[in-house]
Image (tube, helix red, strand yellow):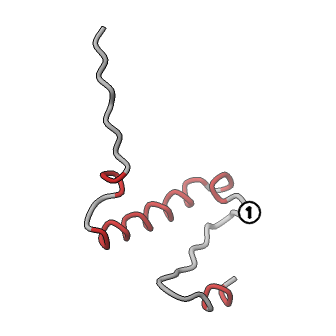
Amino acid sequence: MQQMAAGLKGNTKLKLVPKAGHSPMLENAMAFTEVVNDILAQNDRVMGRSWREVFAFEENEESD
């Protein structure tokens, strides 16, 4: 896996989720979420705006 990742071009990084195999989001959800959040935080610094801002949804205000 590390050899394959080393051969990739661009700004790539190998992130391993401990105690997980083919379904890391199910097998170790906490570690998977941490990896995804780290990637999104790095992207925030590059783009200058938060992924939360990009994907923000306004709540619909419905009157009774």
Q: Is residue 51 left or right of 16 when viewed as pictured?
A: left
Taking 59 as reference, is 5 above or below it? below
Camera-side residue of 45 and 57: 57
Give the mark count. 1
Residue identified by numbered label 1: 22
Q: State the residue lying farthest toward the right.
A: 22
Which quadrant, please, contains the N terminus?
Answer: bottom right
In front: 6, or 35?
6
Q: Position of residue 11 (x, y in %)?
A: 47, 83
Q: Is residue 4 left or right of residue 37?
A: right
Q: Residue at x 37, y 70 (%)?
A: 42
Numbered disc 1: secondary structure: loop
User: Percent x, y for residue 46?
Assistant: 31, 73
Residue at image point 49% right, 62% down: 36
Q: Which image quadrant for residue 51?
A: bottom left
**Residue closer to the observer: 19 or 55:** 55
User: On screen, 10 above or below 36?
Assistant: below
Instruction: Tell me the kind of residue under disc 1.
Output: His
Mark 1 surroundings: few (<14), some (14-19) or many (≥20) residues within 10 A: few
Q: Residue at x 63, y 55 (%)?
A: 25
Answer with the quarter of the image where residue 64 lies.
top left
Q: Nearer the viewer, residue 19 or 3?
A: 3
The residue shown at (52%, 57%) is 33
Residue 61, position as x, y percentages in the image = 29, 22
